[in-house]
Amino acid sequence: AARSRRIVRTHHHCGVHRTGRRIDLHDRAQRERAQEIQARAADRLERLGHSRRQHREVPIFSVDSGLVMERETSWHERQLIQTLEPRVYYVRIPHRDQSDIPVFDSSLADFNFAQMFSENRYVGNDRIGDADQITAAAVSRLIDPATGAELIRGALGQRFYFNDQKVVMPSET
């Protein structure tokens, strides 16, 4: 089976724009092998007591709000723009029992500044973590007004949990 897609490539550094067609060729035997592997995996899950079809519905509610304030300042006679960027993020995901869903590719995400503002504490599709939490943070930057270059950035944030988290990975128990 062959599929045709229109592709557009843009090279901003040299101003060249190319358009064209790309053809993806898929080996029928390779597709059939993939379907066979999926069927064997589903059979194995059934033998282990898991349903052939996994299903869950998990509503997710989140609100993300922020503000950017700027002021002109100077440092050692150099004109700069200083920003103050407060941000508040709330997420509510009710607990759903997911213990009957096997774990293939999920793991606990590293906790870092960006992760503080994500809905799911897990990476992958096998687990959706329950949450009732709020994150508050502030970022401040010093920017060169002539070039727009960010000279320095500082960030501070904290996450507050309203309830204990119940969804866990088998390795977390």
Image: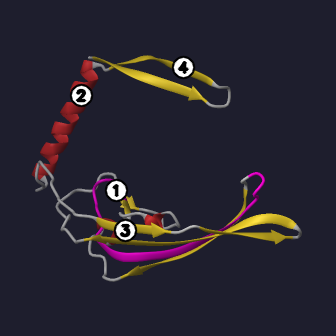
Q: Do the residues bearing badges 1 and 3 touch, measured as CB atoms within 8 Å?
A: no
Amino acid type for the residue under numbered disc 3: Val
Residue with the mark numbered 3: 63
Q: Residue at x 16, y 61 (%)?
A: 100
Residue with the mark numbered 2: 33
Q: Do the residues bearing badges 4 and 1 touch, measured as CB atoms within 8 Å?
A: no
Q: Farthest residue in the right direction?
A: 77
Q: CA distance from mark 3 to mark 2?
A: 44 Å
**Disc with the residue nearer the chain's start (1 vs 2):** 2
Name the secondary structure under disc 1.
loop
Q: Nearer the viewer, mark 4 or mark 2?
A: 4
Residue with the mark numbered 1: 106
Left/right of residue 87 with respect to residue 118 in the rendered view: right
Give the vertical position of 33 relative to 88 (above or below).
above
Q: Nearer the viewer, mark 1 or mark 3?
A: 3
Residue 68 locus on image (x, y percent): 57, 67
Front-lying residue, 101 or 171: 101
